[in-house]
Image: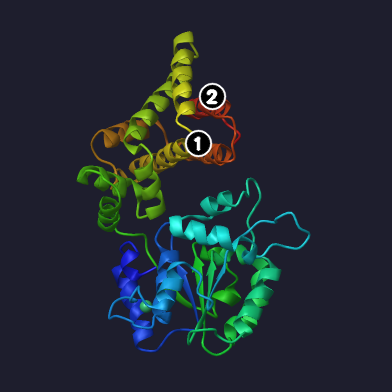
Amino acid sequence: MQFKEVVGQPEIKTKLIGMVSSGKIPHAMMLLGPEGNGNLPLALALAQYVQCEDKQENDSCGACSSCIKNQKFIHPDVHFTFPVVSKKSTEPPISADYITEWRSELASNPYMNSNDWLQSIGAENRQGNITVRECHEIIRGMSMKTYESAYKIQIIWLAEFLKEAGNTLLKVIEEPPANTIFILVVENVEMILNTIISRTQLIKVNAIDDVDVKEALLKRFEMAEDAGRRIARISDGNFNAALSYAEGEENANDKLLHRWLVCCFNLKMKNTTTNSANLMEWVEEISKIGRENQKIFLKYALFFLRECSLISIHGASEKLEGEELRVASGLSSKLDPNQLASASKILNLLYYHVERNGNPKILFISNSFKLASVFKNEEVFV
Ligand SMILES: [Zn+2]
């Protein structure tokens, strides 16, 4: 991947390129920042730049044999570690078990999150893991000579999945073999062992600017400027979310959500035949749009509730405009922050079950009643 393919983040790109040009590449660095900000694409672009045989001022050349291998994620001196689940074997899983899937997912969306990745390898309800066995693989890989380049690069995507296994890597991160670069890609630093944090150079990467998200969307999709601007606004600097919105039929989600909230509020008032019929009609509709679009809808709903909380607490939302802002202001005047938080909890759990193939009709009906109870200020167990 070249830096020019990475969305936004101009300061970080300059910083990373500067490190290479000045010959001051830390032997272990941690790219830290929120989901969808391009941490992993930046790590890929950095690896390609380090190994490029014809470095340009601001980017790798994209044409030398090293670049070509890096662009296919098959460079023998770039090693990848990422969370995996067990295949049907007795040995703990390692990243190499899934390298084909990994290359294919990277090619299709390097902005993916851990859930996207784990679902793509059939994890279903299982938690991903970076195992001690994988750590030994890393140590073995780093102790070998380089094949083609001056540097061996080890990218650990979502190093938070190392958990205690991270202890196995302490020595190699502190005193790595010559010409070795560790790039840890991290979203939640609280989940990283302090002993690892202290051994790496921290590089904070913020969410992407809205204007960069918008421009990237307009380049990639045929969409009106306004639509791009709106998606950028509601994606909140998360390009993975922006891609989902752009690929789904995003524009209808605000109306779909508004109708659902009205249905739940009506259930709160009275569970009449008309109210139930309206809800059933809505549930039929949401059930037909398919799982991926249901997930996009729920992501939007979660974003919307968060903005309602901001309105409720601070009196303003920076992300909503027009009709969306009007509905959000109305909702936040009816619900207090605790109710909004409970509603978000319900939707998060609903997202989890939708993702794992739950029956959409049953899920959306039962959760509509849970939301109605929250709106009634009844205690709901979620
Ligand atoms: Zn090159």
In the visual, does 136 lie left or right of 209? right
Check residue 291 in the rendering and tell me which mark sits there, or answer none.
1
Q: Amino acid at mark 1?
A: Arg
Q: How many marks overall?
A: 2
Image quarter where the N terminus lies is bottom left
Q: In this rendering, is residue 284 above or below 64?
A: above
Left or right of 206 in this view: 87 = right
Would the CB of label 2 be found within 8 Å of ligand 1?
A: no
Location of residue 191 by image quarter:
bottom right
Residue 206 in sight here: yes
**In which quadrant of the rendered image does the C terminus lie?**
top right
Q: Residue at x 62, y 79 (%)?
A: 141
Query: What residue is disc 2 on?
Result: 365
Dot 2: what SS?
A: helix
Q: Give the color scheme: rainbow, by chain, secondary structure or one colour.
A: rainbow
Choose between 337 and 223: the one closer to the eye.
223
Give the class, few, some or many, for how many residues have Cα within 10 Å of label 2's Cα (few <14, many ≥20). Answer: some
Mark 1 Cα-neighbour bin, 10 Å: few <14, some 14–19, many ≥20: some
**Residue 49: assigned label:** none
Can the viewer see residue 167 in this picture? no
Which quarter of the picture shows residue 260?
A: top left
| Percent of width and height locating residue 57 | 27, 81
